[in-house]
């Protein structure tokens, strides 16, 4: 039986490893939401609306599709994740507290999924 976390639906063999409030940075857009790391995927659930909140999954990447993870910045650190999209690699910019812990956890799960 699948588990549902807002708009994120977990598969039967999937469990949440970490989740935290975060921001997804796309060009000039800054989306608030929640970042989920499971033993199978990395997902960002975007929250929109001031009075009436709407949620949708803005990013959903399998661990097999993650090519790298690193941290940039000195004061305002960002988590950069490379996501394979066919022949291309998209760079996803995320702002999350404890970015070093997130980077280590994602890198560990990427290594274990190979």
Image (cartoon, grey):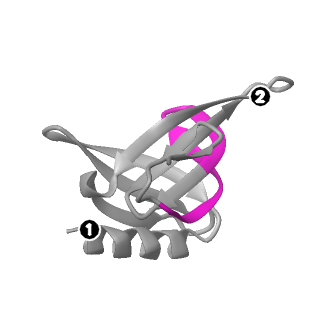
For residue 47, which quarter of the picture? Answer: top right
Picture quarter with the C terminus: bottom left
Query: Could you say whether the residue bearing mark 2 is in a helix, strand or loop?
Result: loop
The residue under label 2 is 53
The numbered mark at residue 25 is none
Query: Could you say whether the residue bearing mark 1 is in a helix, strand or loop?
Result: helix
Is residue 66 in the magenta section? no
Q: Nearer the viewer, residue 70 or 111?
A: 111
Considering every residue shown, the one lying at the far front of the view is 1
Q: Residue at x 67, y 41 (%)?
A: 32
Residue 3 at x, y percent in the picture: 56, 48
Residue 34 at x, y percent in the picture: 63, 49
Considering every residue shown, the one lying at the far left of the view is 87
* Label 2, residues with CA under 10 Å away: few <14, some 14-19, many ≥20: few
* Label 1, residues with CA under 10 Å away: few <14, some 14-19, many ≥20: few
Does 76 appear above or below 11?
below
Disc 1 or 2, which lies upstream in sequence? 2
The numbered mark at residue 113 is 1
* Spatial separation of the CA atoms under disc 1 and disc 2: 35 Å
Q: Residue at x 38, y 55 (%)?
A: 81
**Nearer to us: label 1 or label 2:** 1
For residue 105, which quarter of the picture? Answer: bottom left
Q: Nearer the viewer, residue 59 or 4?
A: 4
35 horizontally vs 69: left or right: right
Residue 45 at x, y percent in the picture: 58, 41
Q: Main secondary structure of the magenta part?
A: strand
Q: Which residues are magenta?
A: 15-34
């Amino acid at each position: 039986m699948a588990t549902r976390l807002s708009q994120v639906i977990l598969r039967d063999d999937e469990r949440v490893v970490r989740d935290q409030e975060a921001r997804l940075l796309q060009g000039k857009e800054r989306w608030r939401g929640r970042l989920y790391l499971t033993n199978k995927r990395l997902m960002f659930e975007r929250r929109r609306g001031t009075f009436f909140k709407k949620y949708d999954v803005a990013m959903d990447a399998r661990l097999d599709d993650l090519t790298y993870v690193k941290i940039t910045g000195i004061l305002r650190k960002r988590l950069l994740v490379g996501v394979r999209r066919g022949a291309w690699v998209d760079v996803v910019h995320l702002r999350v507290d404890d970015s070093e812990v997130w980077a280590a956890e994602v890198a560990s799960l990427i290594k274990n999924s190979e």
